[in-house]
Image: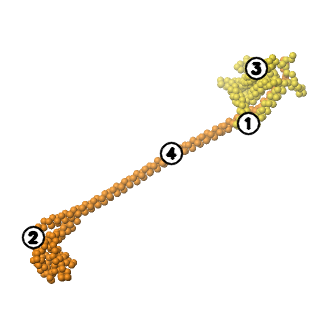
Chain colours: A yellow, B orange
């Protein structure tokens, strides 16, 4: 019996193996983009129900980002919002029969975490400068440099593993339940999975936000601390 | 467990593409529409505020206008009141004047009436006096002899114009001699003789009696009436008194 964690290529484009998570991601992307295009064509000053819900979501995201970063949410809105919406939809896509959520595979989570990591670096460097950002690793003292470096890696991995573990375990539990008692019994677990999926999407987005916010504000704190004694 | 690096790479690319697409087709339009709505709302609020300020200004102006109108109304009322007072004073003055005039007229009328009454009273008194005198004279006058009146009658006849005297007591127009008491034959004869002397011709007389004469004679014939008696004297005295009293 092969491991359920191993993804087998569905087909090849040239030398590139295309796996099930990649296809699922494409479908989700297509749905999201199509929905966005349709919605953006019918935006009105007096919002309809759908537009109102979407405005509510973006507004709530803005509020969350602002709370965490303590500054204008505009530069982080697209990244955090996309991550949140994608992870949410990907997690919930498992409810559709025959679909395995892309986030139940380590590769997708790794790609998401990589994105957050890159954004952390980018925003850290952009707001503090390269030297300023590197200096934040020597906070509070230079002895902390190895720890801080390790922290960057470990927290990225923790992002990956947290999302992967939660979603994958949900999928597994439902799979097992289905094989034991197919009718009605998995429904509570599926409901729980919905909750878990939403919570994980929120946690992933907020943690990404916290990391970016920390990278941005650590430099700011350092700068203000350096200025204040003089 | 095996990590599929191809899948990681593809998923990363997928996510970056999704990031771009959603940013372009979802977040940017949403942000724009919210910002536009906020701007519109701000504009509306500004407009509402401006309208409110305008309305407040209009209200203030209306209030000022109302106060102005009220003030002018008070002024007009005051002017009307003053005019009414002046009019009233004028009317009162005119009424007083009228009253004074009417009182003066009434007093004059009263004076006149009193004068008339007094004159009337005086006339009555004169008449009464004449009456009293007549009563008093009645008894002594009866004793007066006829002869005492004849000279006076002759004198009166002499005073008459010649033409009148000639026609008096003729056969054609006999004269009437009235006496207070009835004359005897001798007395009648004496009268005829005396008159005949005065007239120059024989006197044709008829005799009559009237006690109202008290004493004396009245000769009447044609146009002439000669009174030689106390009644005529009393009447003359009364008339003189009346004339004096009026």
Left or right of B149? Residue A106 is right
Residue B165 vs residue A117, the one in the foreground: B165
Q: Which residue does the numbered mark 2 point to in the structure image?
A: B143
The spot of residue B112 in percent (x, y) is: 27, 62
Q: CA distance from mark 3 to mark 4?
A: 78 Å
Q: Which residue does the numbered mark 3 point to in the structure image?
A: A189
Q: Quadrant of the C terminus of chain A?
A: top right
Between label 1 and label 2, give the one nearer the viewer: 2
Q: In the image, what residue occupies the spot 73% across and 31% down?
A: A54
Displayed quadrant of residue A187: top right
Q: Chain of mark 3?
A: A
Q: Which residue does the numbered mark 4 point to in the structure image?
A: B67
Q: CA distance from mark 1 to mark 2?
A: 161 Å
Q: Which residue does the numbered mark 1 point to in the structure image?
A: A43
Badge 2: residue crowd in 10 Å (few <14, some 14–19, many ≥20) = few
Q: CA distance from mark 1 to mark 4?
A: 53 Å
Between label 3 and label 2, give the one nearer the viewer: 2
């Amino acid at each position: 019996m092969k491991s359920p964690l191993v993804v087998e290529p569905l087909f090849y484009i040239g030398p590139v193996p295309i796996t099930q998570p990649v296809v699922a991601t494409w479908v989700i992307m297509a749905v999201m983009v199509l929905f966005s295009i349709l919605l953006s064509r019918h935006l009105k000053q007096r919002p309809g129900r759908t537009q109102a819900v979407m405005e509510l979501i973006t507004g709530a995201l803005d509020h969350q980002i602002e709370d965490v970063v303590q500054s204008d949410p505009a530069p982080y809105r697209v990244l955090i919002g996309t991550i949140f919406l994608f992870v949410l939809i990907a997690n919930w896509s498992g409810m559709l029969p025959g679909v395995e959520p892309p986030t139940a595979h380590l590769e997708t989570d790794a790609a998401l975490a990589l994105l957050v990591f890159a954004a952390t670096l980018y925003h850290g460097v952009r707001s503090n400068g390269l030297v300023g950002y590197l200096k934040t690793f020597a906070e509070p003292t230079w002895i902390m440099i190895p720890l801080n470096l390790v922290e960057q890696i470990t927290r990225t991995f923790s992002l990956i593993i947290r999302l992967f573990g939660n979603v994958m375990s949900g999928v597994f539990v439902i799979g097992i339940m289905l094989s034991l008692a197919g009718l009605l019994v998995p429904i509570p677990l599926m409901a729980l999975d919905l909750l878990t999926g939403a919570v994980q999407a929120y946690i992933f987005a907020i943690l990404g936000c916290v990391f970016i916010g920390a990278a941005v504000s650590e430099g700011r704190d350092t700068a203000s601390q350096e200025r204040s004694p003089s | 467990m095996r990590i599929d690096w191809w899948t990681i790479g593809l998923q990363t690319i997928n996510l970056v593409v999704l990031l771009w697409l959603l940013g372009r087709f979802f977040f940017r339009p949403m942000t724009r529409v919210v910002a536009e709505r906020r701007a519109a709302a701000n504009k509306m609020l500004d407009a509402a505020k401006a309208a409110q300020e305008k309305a407040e200004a209009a209200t203030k102006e209306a209030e000022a206008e109302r106060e102005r109108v009220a003030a002018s109304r008070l002024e007009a009322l005051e002017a009307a009141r003053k005019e009414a007072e002046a009019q009233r004073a004028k009317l009162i003055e005119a009424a007083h004047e009228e009253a004074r005039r009417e009182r003066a007229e009434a007093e004059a009328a009263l004076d006149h009436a009193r004068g008339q009454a007094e004159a009337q009273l005086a006339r009555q008194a004169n008449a009464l006096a004449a009456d009293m005198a007549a009563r008093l004279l009645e008894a002594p006058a009866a004793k007066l002899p006829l002869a005492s009146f004849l000279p006076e009658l002759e004198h009166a006849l002499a005073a008459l114009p010649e033409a009148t005297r000639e026609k008096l007591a003729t056969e054609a127009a006999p004269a009437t001699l009235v006496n207070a008491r009835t004359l005897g034959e001798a007395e009648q004869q004496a009268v005829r003789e005396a008159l005949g002397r005065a007239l120059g011709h024989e006197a044709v007389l008829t005799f009559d009696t009237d006690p109202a004469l008290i004493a004396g004679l009245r000769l009447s014939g044609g146009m002439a009436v000669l009174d030689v008696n106390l009644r005529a004297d009393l009447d003359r005295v009364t008339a003189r008194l009346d004339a004096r009293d009026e």
